[in-house]
Image: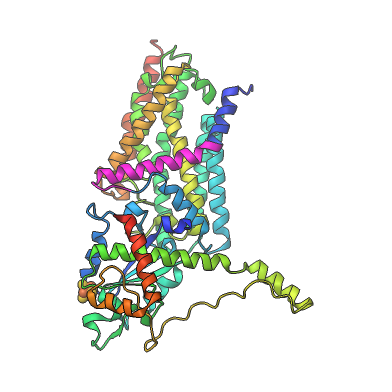
Amino acid sequence: MTVSLYAVIGLAAYLIAGPFVGGWFAGVDRRITARMQGRFGPPILQPFYDVRKLIEKEPVTVNGGQDFYVMCFLIFIIITGGLFFFGQNLLLVIFTLTTANLFLVIGAYSSNSPYSQIGAERELLQMMAYEPMVLLTAVGLYMTTGSFNISDIMLGGALAGGAIPLKYLIGIFAGYLFILTIKFRKSPFDLSLSHHAHQELVKGVTTEFSGRTLALIEIAHWYENVFLLGFIFLFFQNGTWYMALVGVVVALACYFLEIFIDNAFARMKWQFTLKASWLVTITFGAANLILLYYFKGLM
Amino acid sequence: MSYITKSPWIIHYDGSSCNGCDIEVLACLTPMYDVERFGIINTGNPKHADIFLITGSINEQNISVVKQIYEQMPEPKVVAAVGICATSGGIFKECYNIMGGVDTVIPVDVYIPGCAARPEAIIDGVVAALGALDEKKKALDARPKISDTAADSAMGAASDDSVDGAPPEPPEDPILPGDDVEVKYYGAASEDEEAESAADGSGGGQEEGSAGDSGKEEA
Ligand code: SF4
């Protein structure tokens, strides 16, 4: 394996700038949300103030294991994004992402609070809802570019022949956008944890986390969001700089779209989440793959 | 100013309020008042909260609930009593099951009078609570760390005259009924109160001044 300069730059940029970009996005998100609701909204840097405050608070933990699990959650999220921006295997990235989320679920389960446990159960259901689509995305990118390696996908595939993967993966792109709502924890699918004031489950998975531990979860989410937007970026790559620019712009546009969806919908039940996301996975994701498989022979 | 004053998260509990004050608390979140401008978030979770807003008086049934919420909040934390019911019992004071204001159960830092307390007064009170929060944060920072005190006591065994730093502050006692409570009013200063605070002398005047300063930020 040859390590390209781009991969090293990508990794370094992600590790250092990732949380700042993610936190800034979160601040912009809150401001845009407020404007959509006719409010003025908090300062853009508010998420950083929140995290600084949480670090300053008195540490209170329910049990000794909790902090460990959350630490693992953060570390595995960083590894996930690190592998992604280092141009490694897409499947490996997806599996580390799952591992990371499982640590959060275990952390939430480890306390006896019913809110936290129901939050953990819902988190598992959400994972069931979005995992198939994430895997199909990887398979779709493999079928168009002939490689699971992100550094190869970035150059555009053999099949694509200079075209961006999106050309063959419109259905998969739509499906990925759909599950992105779940991953970003936006309404209507913010079942396990929400940044808004609905309190039916108190704070879901994070109910029993406070202070520094909660700050770690926030930072992990910033890292995760940057990585998830990176996926969108991948759909637009054929090795040219202007498509890289297009990729960034579209990723930002998708983020805006998610904020809009967040404000336009109420929270749905988990049954709906599961059914809807699997329906989308089958109709958009699987159908796209089948068509691609069929037409691949003709191209 | 520490970061805690830039991101105060609130938990709101309804004691035995008539719901008038609760509606006003929620009104603070609406586009009209939008407290999120100051980073204030209404969280339902005591473990995430910095400010405890209580509306309504304390009755026999919810003493344990209020105490539990208060205990679950990590330090530094402040309590704000919203409405005249939470301040002193209000119109329910004479009821057979009413203990009185919130300060009969837990220490209260800010009193926000009014029936119902207006959103402006609540915001003003919360901003005043930030001052109290900042002071508590400083007091916490000044307190020697547990490891330090352990080391100190170990040292003290060897040479017992080595008393470094101030001893840890004893926790503030809960204010009991019948105690002489110095009541600070924020937000709705009527003429009587102004006269009172003027008569109070420098202490009261300072309080008013600091509340006014922080109040300006919102304007
Ligand atoms: S102060 Fe007035 S409005 Fe508020 S809870 Fe009491 S009676 Fe209701």
Q: Main secondary structure of the magenta part?
A: helix
Q: Is residue B159 left or right of residue A282?
A: right
The C terminus of chain A - image quarter: top left
Q: Position of residue B31 (x, y in %)?
A: 23, 52
In this rendered view, identify the residue nearer to me: B197 or A56: B197
Q: Quadrant of residue A176?
A: top left
Residue B21 belongs to the span the image colors magenta? no
Magenta segment boundaries in residue numbering: A16-41
Name the residue: 57% across, 67% down.
B142
Residue A190 locus on image (x, y percent) = 35, 48
The image position of residue A126, as x and y in percent, is 39, 46
- Quadrant of the rendered image holding ligand 1: bottom left
Instruction: Classify the position of the N terminus of chain A by image quarter.
Output: top right
Q: Taking B11 as reference, is A279 above or below it?
A: above
Residue B159 falls left or right of residue A151:
right
Residue drawn at point x = 42 percent, y = 55 percent: B6
